[in-house]
C-alpha cells in the first residue's frame, strides 16, 4: 500500500458521503415519487442538487474502480464507510451540531471495523482469478 | 403503504448494489492495477481495457438499478433510515457474496469488520 493508494481510498470515502448528502437534499425538493409517476425519477437529474450529487458520485465511482483494481471488495467497502464518520465529524466540528451518544458509538464501531480490515492484507486473490490474470498478462507480453 | 415502498426500495438497493459490487470487482481484477497500467500505457489504454470487460457493463446496469431504487427510496423514506439500512445490510451481503463468488478470503477478521461497520452505520442513524 502506497500513499497514493491511501489517497484513492480517502477519495472513495469523501466523494460517496458528499454525493449521497447532495442527492438526499435534491430528492427532498421533489417529494414522494410513487409507482404511478416513475418518469419523475428520470427528470430528477435536472435538479441542481441532484446533478451536483451525481457529479460527485461519478468521482466516487472512478476512485472506487481504481481501488477495486488492486484491492479486495471486502477491503475497499469498509474504507468507504469512513465517509459517514467524516460527515458526522464535519457536522460536529464544522457546523457545531451535537452528536448523540449512539452516533459516537456508531463512529467507534465503523472506525474499529475499518481498522480491523486495514491491518490485514489488501488483496487475497482467488487462485482461479489470479491465474486468469497472470495468463492474460503473459499472453499480452 | 409508505413504509412498504421504503422497505421494498431498501431490499432492491441491497440486492442490486451487492450484485453490482461483485460484478465490478470481478471486472477490475481482470483489468489489473489501473495505477500500473496508466503509468505504463497511458489513460486511454486503461479506459479501453475497462470498456472491453463485459462484466463491467453488467455491473453498471446493476448499479443503475440500485441508484434509481435509492432515489425512489429517498423520495418515500427518511435519509436517516434508507441510506444506513441499505448500506449496513449491503456490507453484510457483500461479505458473504465476496466469499462465495469472488473467492476472497473472508476470514473471521473481515467478517467481524463487516458486522462492526454494519452495526456502526445503523447506529449513525439514531
Image (cartoon, coloured by chain):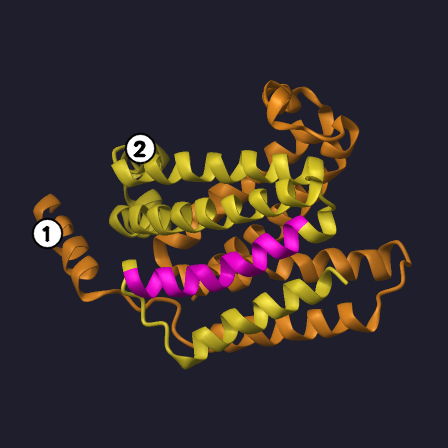
Chain colours: A orange, B yellow
Task: Decide if residue A55 is on the left or right side of residue A74.
Answer: right
Q: Which residue is mark 1?
A: A138
Task: Decide if residue A102 is on the left or right side of residue B54.
Answer: right
Q: Picture coordinates of residue B49 (x, y %)?
A: 27, 37
Q: Residue at x 72, y 25 (%)?
A: A48
Q: Chain of mark 2?
A: B
Q: Residue at x 70, y 40 (%)?
A: B2
Q: Picture coordinates of residue B58 (x, y %)?
A: 33, 37
* Disc 1 residue crowd, few under 14, some 14–19, many 20+, Cα 10 Å: few
Q: Which residues are magenta?
A: B82-100
Q: In the figure, residue A73 lies in which quadrant?
A: bottom left
Does the image show residue B83? yes
Task: Decide if residue A131 is on the left or right side of residue B89.
Answer: left
Q: Which residue is mark 2?
A: B51
Q: Residue at x 89, y 58 (%)?
A: A97
Q: Nearer the viewer, residue A21 or B16?
A: B16
Amino acid at each position: 500500500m502506497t500513499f497514493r493508494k491511501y489517497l484513492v481510498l480517502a477519495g472513495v470515502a469523501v466523494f460517496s458521503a458528499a454525493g449521497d448528502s447532495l442527492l438526499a437534499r435534491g430528492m427532498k425538493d421533489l417529494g414522494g415519487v410513487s409507482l404511478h409517476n416513475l418518469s419523475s425519477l428520470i427528470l430528477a437529474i435536472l435538479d441542481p442538487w441532484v446533478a451536483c450529487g451525481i457529479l460527485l458520485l461519478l468521482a466516487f465511482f472512478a476512485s472506487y474502480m481504481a481501488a477495486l483494481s488492486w484491492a479486495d471488495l471486502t477491503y475497499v467497502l469498509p474504507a468507504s464507510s469512513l465517509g459517514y464518520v467524516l460527515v458526522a465529524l464535519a457536522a460536529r466540528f464544522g457546523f457545531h451540531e451535537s452528536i448523540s451518544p449512539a452516533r459516537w458509538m456508531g463512529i467507534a464501531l465503523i472506525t474499529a471495523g475499518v481498522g480491523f480490515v486495514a491491518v490485514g492484507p489488501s488483496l487475497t486473490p482467488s487462485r482461479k482469478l489470479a491465474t486468469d490474470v497472470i495468463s492474460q498478462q503473459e499472453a499480452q507480453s | 403503504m409508505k413504509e412498504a415502498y421504503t422497505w421494498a426500495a431498501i431490499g432492491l438497493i441491497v440486492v442490486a448494489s451487492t450484485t453490482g459490487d461483485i460484478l465490478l470487482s470481478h471486472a477490475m481484477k481482470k483489468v489489473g492495477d489501473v495505477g500500473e497500467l496508466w503509468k505504463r500505457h497511458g489513460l486511454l489504454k486503461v479506459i479501453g481495457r475497462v470498456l472491453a470487460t463485459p462484466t463491467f457493463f453488467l455491473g453498471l446496469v446493476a448499479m443503475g438499478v440500485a441508484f434509481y431504487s435509492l432515489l425512489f427510496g429517498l423520495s418515500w423514506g427518511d435519509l436517516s433510515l434508507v441510506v444506513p439500512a441499505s448500506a449496513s445490510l449491503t456490507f453484510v451481503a457483500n461479505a458473504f457474496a465476496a466469499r462465495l463468488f469472488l473467492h476472497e478470503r473472508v476470514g473471521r477478521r473481515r467478517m467481524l469488520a463487516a458486522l462492526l461497520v454494519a452495526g456502526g452505520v445503523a447506529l449513525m442513524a439514531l
